[in-house]
Image: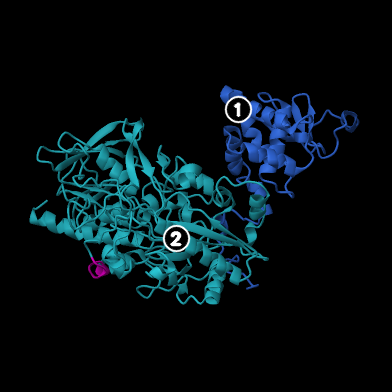
Amino acid sequence: MAAPYDLNDDSVVVIIGSGAGGGTLGNELAQKGIDVVVLESGARHEHEDFINDEWDSFAQLAWLDHRTTGGGWRVAKDFPNLPAWIVKAVGGTTTHWAGASLRFQEHEFRTLSHYGKIDGANLLDWPITLAELEPYYAKAEDKMGVTRTNGIEGLPGNNNFKILKAGADKLGYKECHTGNMAINSADRDDRMSCQQTGFCFQGCKWGAKWSTLYTEIPKGEATGKLEVRPQSHVVKIEHDASGKVNAVVYADKDGKLHSQKARIVAVAGNSIESPRLLLNSASAKFPDGLANSSGQVGKNYMRHTTGSVYAVFEKPVHMYRGTTMAGIIRDEAKHDPSRGFVGGYELETLSLGVPFMAAFLDPGGWGRSFASAMDSYANMAGLWIVGEDMPQEQNAVKLHGELKDQYGMPIPDVWFTDHANDVAMRNHAYQQGQALYEAVGATRSFPTPPYPSTHNLGTNRMSEKASDGVVNKWGQTHDIKNLFVSDGSQFTTGGAENPTLTIVSLAIRQADYIAKEMAAGSI
Amino acid sequence: MTTIYEQRPGISRRELLKRGTVGAALIIAGNAVISPDRAWGMETTALKPETMATLIKLARDIYPHDAISDRFYAIAVKGHETKAGTDAAHKTLIEDGIADLDKRAGANGYRGLGWEDDRVAILRDIEATPFFQAVRGDLVVSFYNQKELWPHFGYEGESYSKGGYIARGFDDIEWL
């Protein structure tokens, strides 16, 4: 039974957000007998309610609250109010994610030491190592049912993967397989196996893909120690005279404000909303926003160096059939500065349906070149580039100077410009992707620009020293002991890997820490 | 609501011939745009029918798929007629934008330019305008999101109700 908690109950841990970070943390704490209230801004749609239609699903799940974006990236021009393609619903972006679950590489936790200083980049070593996180990676992989771990078989390769693999072989790549996917290749954990439906991004209607919506959250609720309040949009975190946070103010579905008292608050609203909330919670005591003595809240916004390559063949591929991202090449993920950039990138299979292909293949594109590409849709294969981007202080989530949301709070304004290293990496990846497809007979290929960000990272970064970042190695803010950050905004740097597995691992580890500190009475 | 309907009655083939417009060109009759083969028609109330006919031509020039009939382009742009009915600023944007296209095209207007390349040259000059951006930005969804068109592109759409592709060819590629 889900436990309903009183607004005045000041013994609860309040978690803001129910995605990979918040949903996992909530369940882990509830399993330890700790009382948890999860405030989720979006509605609860169970997996049967998901829609196999790109635009209809987008309307159902996407975070569409008003946002602005600027800077040198093309998204600012093509999608000026959609810097990110993430979700507002119970389960957060774990409803939409593709399932790729990769561990960071050892050196990616210490980029400043390993790469050296890079002009214009705000590199910093994480305060934790791979060795420290490995036991939690193992727990996360087991929890999520990641293929090629724990004796779980890989997913079968679809047509899009077969093209990728054939091209990888021609180019001499060695590490190409159907991925480490948090998608069941056989029934597991009371969830069925993948039916190759091809709508991973629209929410898995079978529940084969791991999402907190139908794993962590119901498991937490079953303990009687976890309450999820959907359509509860947090506008402000409050604190007492000593500076400890003690309540969270949120608007319900009718816009009515409530205040939930809290012993501990964990922010897990993704890397745009989390820093926005800390900044919007500024007070007389904390005039620059909560946990912002370093001035780093909202800074160092990362979104992975991405891009896609689509290629047309003489004969049909039907890339949209089957698991969208079950295909990876890892050979370029290493750090090899002889390529002209630091860090590395993954190549992963990707597909869009016709409606989204039209919107994203070449945003703003039109005419015969564009239309003939669309006419070749059935014969297309596609891959996605995901690589480490450089943290830059001026890439930031800021509060808009004028525009406010329906609750009177400044909306987020997301600034991003590629670093020269990002551009060099993307160009290398485009070249490799196009060469790969040409090696198996592509007649035409398209270096497609980045989509609105799905991997939003770094805006409350983890640091050893309080002056360098927002949270410590446990995700606990340097400034306020009972305030935590539990999402990808903790990332000190981004790595080349899809971030969800690391977010989940950090959340499991953070739950252990919170439980220990609560038991010790230190928070 | 603007409706697209099949087989507009009331205009005889003889009358159409008299108008001298049978052929590839859309026909304007009263407040309606009618396809040359009279397979469909579309009445307008907010926008001029000539404007709607030019919008349809413009839509095809933006996303030229030669195997797709005008009817789908008409469906894709009818939202401008609907919106113009309640939004005076939008009506002005569209009417003025089309008038500008006609002016740039010379004596016979935009639809009077026989070669796509000549029309596209005009569009390249105006592609940064709010008018063109509004038309293209709407069209990329209103055109490609028509389920009836997906078979043309070889896209099968919804698959959950059919059990996904696990037994329907997710890995059926044979030419590699």
Q: Amino acid at mark 2?
A: Ala
Q: In this picture, is A9 found above or below A368?
A: above
Q: Tell me whether the residue at label 1 lies in contact with that at label 2, contact meaning CB atoms closer than 8 angstroms.
A: no
Check disc 1 and report the residue beneath it.
B93
Q: Is residue A133 magenta?
A: yes
Q: Residue at x 42, y 67 (%)?
A: A187
| Residue B125 makes an appearance in the image | yes
In the figure, residue A180 lies in which quadrant?
bottom left
Q: Is B50 positioned to the left or the right of A475 in the image?
A: right
Q: Amino acid at mark 1?
A: Leu
Q: Secondary structure at mark 2?
A: helix
In the figure, residue B16 lies in which quadrant?
top right
Chain shown cyan: that is A
Alpha-carbon distance for marks 1 and 2? Answer: 41 Å
Q: In this view of the protein, which residue sits in the foreground, B92 or B110?
A: B110
Magenta residues, as a range?
A129-135
Q: Residue furthest top?
A: B88
Percent x, y of residue A189: 36, 65
Chain shown blue: that is B
